[in-house]
Image (cartoon, rainbow, N blue to C red):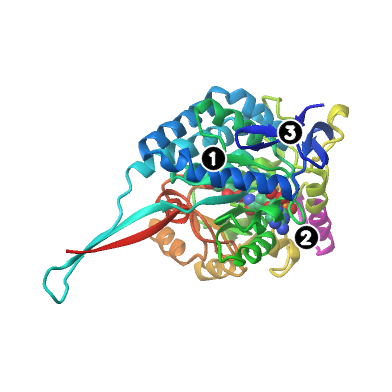
Amino acid sequence: MKEIKHFINGEYVGSASGKLFDNVNPSNGQVIAKIHEAGEAEVDAAVKAARAALKGPWGKMTVAERTEILHRVAAGITARFDEFLEAECLDTGKPKSLASHIDIPRGAANFSVFADLVKNVPTEAFEMATPDGTGALNYGVRRPKGVIGVISPWNLPLLLMTWKVGPALACGNTVVVKPSEETPTTTALLGEVMNAAGVPAGVYNVVHGFGGNSAGAFLTAHPDVDAITFTGETGTGETIMRAAAKGVRQVSLELGGKNAGIVFADCDMDKAIEGTLRSAFANCGQVCLGTERVYVQRPIFDEFVARLKAGAEALKIGEPNDPSANFGSLVSHKHREKVLSYYQKAKDEGATIVTGGGVPDMPAHLAGGAWVQPTIWTGLPDDSAVVTEEIFGPCCHIRPFDTEEEAIELANSLPYGLASAIWTENSSRAHRVAGQIEAGIVWVNSWFLRDLRTAFGGAKQSGIGREGGVHSLEFYTELKNICVKL
Ligand SMILES: NC(=O)C1=CN([C@@H]2O[C@H](COP(=O)(O)OP(=O)(O)OC[C@H]3O[C@@H](n4cnc5c(N)ncnc54)[C@H](O)[C@@H]3O)[C@@H](O)[C@H]2O)C=CC1
Ligand SMILES: O=C(O)/C=C/C=C(\O)C(=O)O
């Protein structure tokens, strides 16, 4: 059986403890590899390698040399596109039709975009007067923050890991990555690309394992990690913040959401249906930006519900290699238990099940997979668990509203504030409502339309800090002011 090892100082190494755990293909339940679980020794070795590379060749390179190498990393991912695609889909169960358009191309773009960006970002300068009349000149310089701990999730494994590693390396840092225990393969494979691209040993390190009392906790507690960037659940974010408090390390946290879609009666219905179908069901609903609460203005409520139902029922459920499939399995049986517990809660709370609500019938060879049906509910109270808690599954609740003010109040009613989508053809309304939504990202007549130069992150309990464009550079560098008396 294939083994997935740590990548430390440019080499694949196993765990000293010999501890292994299963890597499972969620579309059929079969074990596809054994993963080495890192102990404190492997995490420490990875951090030491990262520190040495920072002081050594990587830290001494010019920006031009470093960014040329990162362009080679991007090209290396593209050259091995099919291997990355196969690995990502086996780990996650997502359709190749989706990952080939989003996950793998973004994995490459996350290196090339930030390689270009760091070459073109100015810093500030201020001339000042001094009492003796000679004056002084202040100017800023950016320096790498150091060794960055990267903790990444399973829903978009390569995309979200490289979204952090790309800018971190472009800024001259070195990294130790702990990918999700569910989806380690593309993060491991990237080590080969790094070596082939000429990234010096120790710049990119990977340790595998779980979160609490395992590789994740060992990495975030390690005193020689200078900053931590994390995407995942809000509760885990709180735990990581506590770990980072020791030693006063900075964190960047992209956390959960319970995002609202607001559909006004003056929307283009075709666009609103197409966008909401994607925002609720793409990647089997496992996108932190996804819409789990849909608010629809009353005059179009019945038509919207009927058309979304038809769209959900037309989704083609299938395994990653099925070219006609656009709806895969969930990432794991553990996650399916969580999603199905909400399907049950919806029933208990008295929801009207518009469609779905259970497990689809699958052919025998896929019967062991983590399948669930795309599901739509109506009729739940605003304070029900299904309407207030992040489910992270292919499901949404639709509720009618009457006025713009009511829609804004409903959208802002939860402690989360990640993303929102507004559907209206009235541009004044679009700007007015978007300005009042308490979220880090608001899309108007679109969803998951990403320009990597823009700020990305959550308000309220959906995160701390912003990444993307110059905001990533702010997190991954220390800005130092140099004041020169003239
Ligand atoms: N992109 C997102 O916003 C994501 C949200 N989630 C949400 O989180 C729920 C639970 O999924 P999980 O995989 O358990 O998410 P999680 O937040 O626990 O895991 C994400 C990453 O954090 C690591 N981790 C967990 N505990 C840690 C700790 N104490 N110290 C350091 N690292 C730790 C995990 O090993 C994984 O690499 C999902 O049902 C979903 O609601 C999960 C994954 C992604
Ligand atoms: O486009 C991105 O950078 C990120 C997209 C999705 C997430 O952050 C997520 O699902 O966690």
What is the secondary structure assignment of the residue under circle 3? strand
Vertical placement of 459 versus 191: above or below? below
Residue 24, percent from left and from top: 80, 36
Question: Residue 360's x, y, as percent?
Answer: 82, 39
Residue at 55%, 47% (x, y): give it.
51
Q: Which residue is mark 3?
A: 4
Specify the amino acid type for callout 3: Ile
Q: Is residue 34 left or right of residue 459?
A: right
Front: mark 3 or 2: 3
Q: Is residue 380 above or below residue 161?
A: below
Magenta-colored span: 340-354
For the point 42% across and 61% down, the residue is: 429
- The residue where tag 2 is placed is 351
Numbered label attached to residue 203:
1
- Residue type of the residue flagged with mark 1: Val
Nearest to N terminus: mark 1 or mark 3: 3
Quadrant that contains the C terminus: bottom left
User: Does 252 appear above or below 136?
Assistant: above
Q: Nearer the viewer, mark 1 or mark 3?
A: 1
Q: Tell me if I can see residue 296 in this picture.
A: yes
- Membership of 343 in magenta stretch: yes
